[in-house]
Image (cartoon, rainbow, N blue to C red):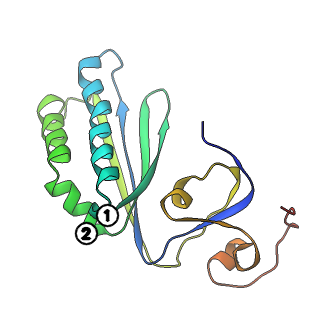
Amino acid sequence: MAKVVPGRFTAQLEGPFVVLIIGMRVNRLLAVHKWVPVATAMGGMLKELYEHPELGFLGSTAHFNMREITQIQYWRSYEHLENYARNSHNHLSAWRKFNQSVGTDGTVGIFHETYLVEAGKYECIYGNMPVWGLAKAGEHLPAVGKRETSRRRLGGDNEPAVPTPSQ
């Protein structure tokens, strides 16, 4: 279990970056032979991405519920993400297998959403959390001073609506 870091923190990442939300949904629970290969394919891809930072992958978090597995991934650029999707043996192999095994039969759903984030056009807060999300992919910084409020983190100026607890 990840160590909780008491206090209020935010994240910083230099330059633009990409957020990819990607995942799968089990539509027919008894079709184990269809969804298990889809669920396990991501492991090989993540191993490759973490071993090769030059591919532009910055980090990810995973979320599970009864029928879905979702990952929030952070990438240096859309070009890095697209290059990986189109040229990685691990990704192309999983994509082909999905199309051959599942295709459009409805047993397993897949999804992704891609967001291109301009430098400084984001803000986040983590209170009493492990280092998570963008803070895990970038820098984990105390949410004080120019980072204390949402508007300040976005480059504006205002006062906290509620007093910030002392750290």
**Which is nearer the N-term, disc 2 or disc 1?**
1
Circle on res. 79: 2
Secondary structure of the residue carrying tag 1 is: loop
Query: Residue 166 placed where, x, y %?
Result: 87, 63
Quadrant of res 85: bottom left
Drawn side of residue 25 relative to residue 7, left or right: left
For the image, the number of numbered tags is: 2
Q: Nearer the viewer, residue 110 or 123?
A: 123
> Which amino acid type corresponds to the residue marked 1 in the rendered image?
Gly
Q: Residue at the location (53% across, 54% down)?
A: 133
Q: Residue at the location (33% across, 21% down)?
A: 28
Query: Is residue 116 something one can see in this rendering?
Result: no
Quadrant of res 144: bottom right
Secondary structure of the residue carrying tag 2 is: helix
4 vs 7: above or below: above
The CA distance from mark 2 to mark 1 is 9 Å
Q: Would you call the spot at circle 2 few (<14 residues within 10 Å), some (14-19), or many (20 or more)? A: few
On the image, numbered disc 1 is attached to which residue? 56
Q: Nearer the viewer, residue 79 or 4?
A: 4
Q: Nearer the viewer, residue 71 or 142?
A: 142
CB-based contact (under 8 Å), mark 2 and mark 1: yes
Q: Residue at the location (26% across, 35% down)?
A: 41
Drawn side of residue 15 relative to residue 149, left or right: left
Query: Residue 27 placed where, x, y %?
Result: 35, 27
Nearer to us: label 2 or label 1: 1
Q: Residue at the location (66% across, 61% down)?
A: 125
